[in-house]
């Protein structure tokens, strides 16, 4: 997508293969800064500290982290150690495991002397495929937005009001995004729409990241407090909700940023369609339901403190009393019964095992690592 009119990906390999360049998302929206990851540890640190975040981008960064490890040492021990180091960074997003297993499967059969080149090529392929997947999600989702717009025009109403949660735009992927890809394509096609951007406490990825990238693209939007979502839905000011996913279980249960479940409940109570945009690599066929999805518990400081721009520049301030502890589950699971549909690169389907298998029949035959 564009930054100040310039096409930009969230992760880009350096010409000399000495590393990859990322956008440091911990500094947005107040400062745009690119950072070079030049070895395994830099890649692992970037994932763990959320310099890069979003399930697809985490997977892409891990792939390049493994490729950088192979440049330094392509032995079997180094390959397994690099995989384990990266796999330990964040537990919820399944794309991390998916990318590392794909890389390992590609590299292990090769002679040591061929692994570094093959790893770099495979990581680049993962990134290019992510862009194509997200564009396809965007096309299918745009058709749904067109349908909503036609209904509103028929009733004499104006543009489509979309609500989203956290950041599932291009900053969460290599390019385009998942939940926001339909928004960008619809906006570019001239469909009038407006996006309600929930702030997404405690890290405020909605207010900081989604709002920033929508503004860069010129999409009309309004930032709201998380607790305003139900009020807006009840008032008829939301036509549909689209969110992303860090992992979707085989039965259609969805793990996404904390607070997603509450929005799904409000959407159901107000008969607002609640859709989840998910690429194939984010579907975890090994898990029969969302009950088995590991939920990351992050540092309490993310709850007790907040980052913003003050007179002295970007700074962190404390919100809570010194002696008050805080809990920080980073994700929640929305049951499939609350999901109106899944938007994938292969089309829309019901949030169910049957719906998913209708689009991914090969999973029933047994992809590597899938349920039988």
Image (tube, helix red, strand yellow):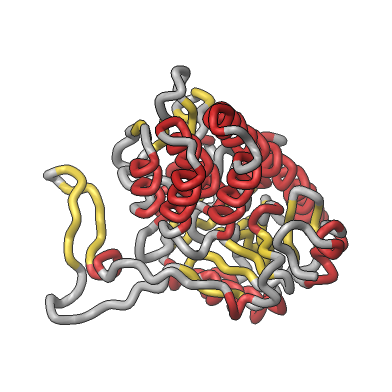
**Position of 153 relative to 295 (above/below):** above
Q: Residue at x 48, y 69 (%)?
A: 331
Task: Please indicate whether residue 311 sits to the left or right of residue 345 in the image.
Answer: left
Q: Position of residue 167 (x, y in %)?
A: 50, 53
Task: Please indicate whether residue 230 sits to the left or right of residue 282 in the image.
Answer: left
Q: Position of residue 62 (x, y in %)?
A: 49, 45
Q: Residue at x 49, y 23 (%)?
A: 6
Front-most of residues 334 and 83: 83
Q: Is residue 124 visible?
A: no
Task: Please indicate whether residue 1 sits to the left or right of residue 131 in the image.
Answer: left
Q: Quadrant of the N terminus?
A: top right
Q: Quadrant of residue 16?
A: top left
Front-most of residues 74 and 229: 74
Q: Quadrant of residue 362?
A: bottom right
Front-most of residues 224 and 263: 263
Q: Is residue 179 visible?
A: yes
Q: Quadrant of the C terminus?
A: bottom right
Q: Position of residue 247 (x, y in %)?
A: 60, 63
Q: Residue at x 27, y 77 (%)?
A: 326
């Amino acid at each position: 997508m564009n930054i100040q009119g310039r096409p930009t990906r969230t992760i880009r390999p350096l010409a000399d293969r000495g590393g990859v360049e990322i956008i440091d998302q911990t500094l947005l929206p107040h400062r745009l800064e690119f950072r070079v990851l030049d070895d395994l540890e830099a890649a692992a640190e970037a994932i763990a500290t959320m310099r890069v975040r979003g399930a697809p981008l985490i997977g892409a960064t891990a792939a390049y982290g493994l490729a950088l490890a192979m440049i330094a040492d392509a032995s079997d021990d180094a390959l397994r150690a690099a995989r384990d180091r990266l796999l330990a960074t964040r537990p919820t997003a399944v794309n991390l495991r998916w990318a590392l297993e794909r890389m390992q499967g590609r590299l292990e059969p090769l002679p040591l002397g061929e692994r570094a080149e093959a790893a770099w090529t495979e990581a680049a392929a993962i990134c290019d495929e992510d862009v194509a997947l997200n564009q396809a999600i965007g096309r299918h989702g745009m058709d749904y937005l067109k349908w909503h717009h036609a209904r509103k025009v028929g009733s004499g109403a104006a543009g489509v009001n979309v609500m989203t949660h956290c950041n599932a735009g291009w900053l969460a992927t290599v390019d385009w995004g998942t939940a926001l890809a339909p928004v960008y394509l619809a906006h570019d096609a001239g469909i009038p729409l407006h996006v309600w951007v929930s702030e997404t406490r405690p890290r405020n990825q909605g207010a900081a990241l989604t709002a920033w990238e929508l503004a860069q693209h010129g999409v009309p939007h309004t930032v709201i407090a998380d607790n305003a979502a139900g009020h807006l839905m009840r008032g008829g000011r939301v036509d549909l909700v689209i969110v992303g996913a860090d992992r979707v279980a085989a039965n259609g249960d969805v793990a996404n940023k904390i607070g997603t479940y509450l929005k799904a409940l409000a959407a159901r109570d107000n008969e607002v369609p609640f859709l989840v945009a998910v690429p194939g690599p984010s579907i975890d066929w090994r898990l029969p339901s969302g009950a088995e999805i590991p939920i990351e518990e992050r540092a309490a400081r993310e709850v007790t403190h907040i980052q913003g721009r003050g007179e002295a520049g970007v700074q962190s301030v404390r919100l809570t009393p010194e002696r008050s502890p805080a809990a920080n589950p980073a994700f929640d699971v929305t049951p499939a019964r609350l999901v109106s549909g899944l938007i994938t690169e292969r089309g829309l389907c019901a949030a169910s095992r049957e719906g998913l298998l209708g689009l991914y029949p090969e999973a029933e035959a047994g992809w590597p690592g899938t349920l039988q």
